[in-house]
Amino acid sequence: MKTNFHSKSLALICLFFTGALQSVDAQVGRADVQGVIGQATYTVAGAAAIPLRAGASVPAGATVTTGRSSAVDLYFGPELGTVRLTQNTVLSLEKLGPQTLVSLLEGSVVGWGAKVPASTEFQVKLPNGIVGIVEGKYRLDARSYLVLLNGAMVFAYVPPGASPTPYTLKGPPAVYFSPIEGVKPAPAALQREVELQCKGKLR
C-alpha cells in the first residue's frame, strides 16, 4: 500500500496546533467485543460501568477499562483490525468511522490486522503524542513506548514543554520507539514478548 508518511506526520502535528483533539465529538459507530478474560467494563458519559462480554458492542464515546490479569479484544472492522487491551488499561473510543480516533489513557494495547486505506484514518492519542496506524502488528504504551513488528505507522511525539516531532516506523525488520532513544531495531526478546501478547483467542 502506497502511503505518504511525511504528509501523515504533518497532519498529526496539525491536530495539536489546531486543538482538534481537545473538542472531539463522538461519531456514530461501534466496536465489537471478540473476547474477554478477567474483568473488563465500559462507561459512557459518567454512567455506571457495564461489564463486557464476547459478542457485545461498545459505542463511540465509551471508555473501556481492564482490570488486573484481564484483557479484551475489540474489533474495529476489516480495515482497522483488532485491538487487544492488556491488563490495567484505559482506552477511550473518541470517534469511530472513516476517521477513527481512540485515546490510550493508561496501560497498553496490541493490535493486528490493520490495513488502513488512504481514504480512512486510524489514530491513537497518547498523553504525549498521537500515532497514525497504517498497517501491521504493533504494541502501543501510554508512556510513549511503541513496538512495530511489521507494517507502518507514524508518531508525532510531543515531549513536555516542547514542539511535536514526527517519527516514521516501518517493518520488517521490527522496530521500537522510546522517548530517550527514538526509533531503534527491536531486540529479539521484545519481538517475542509482543508476539505472545497478540497470540491466542480470548474467551
Image (tube, rainbow, N blue to C red):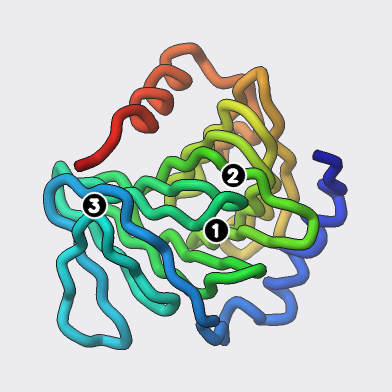
The residue labelled by disc 2 is 114
Amino acid type of the residue that numbered disc 3 sits on in the rendered structure: Asn
Give the alpha-carbon distance from disc 1 to disc 2, as whole Å.
Answer: 13 Å
Amino acid type of the residue that numbered disc 1 sits on in the rendered structure: Val
Judge left or right: residue 30 versus residue 10. Answer: left
Report x, y in % for residue 136.
Answer: 60, 36
Amino acid type of the residue that numbered disc 2 sits on in the rendered structure: Ala
- For the point 61% across and 65% down, the residue is 161
Say which label, 1 or 2, has the lower sequence index: 2
Q: Which mark is residue 74?
A: none
Q: Is residue 183 above or below residue 119?
A: above
Q: Quadrant of the C terminus?
A: top left
Give the alpha-carbon distance from disc 1 to disc 3, as whole Å.
Answer: 17 Å
Q: Secondary structure at mark 1?
A: strand
- For the point 72% across and 43% down, the residue is 167
Q: Which mark is residue 124?
A: 1
Mark 1: few/some/many CA within 10 Å (<14, 14-19, 20+): many
Residue closer to the observer: 200 or 163: 200
Residue closer to the observer: 54 or 163: 54
- For the point 27% across and 64% down, the residue is 56
Q: Is residue 90 above or below residue 143?
A: below
Say which label, 1 or 3, has the lower sequence index: 3
Judge left or right: residue 52 versus residue 15. Answer: left
Q: Is residue 194 above or below residue 18?
A: above
Q: Secondary structure at mark 3?
A: loop
Q: Which mark is residue 88?
A: 3
**Residue 105 shows in the view:** no
Report x, y in % for residue 168.
Answer: 74, 40
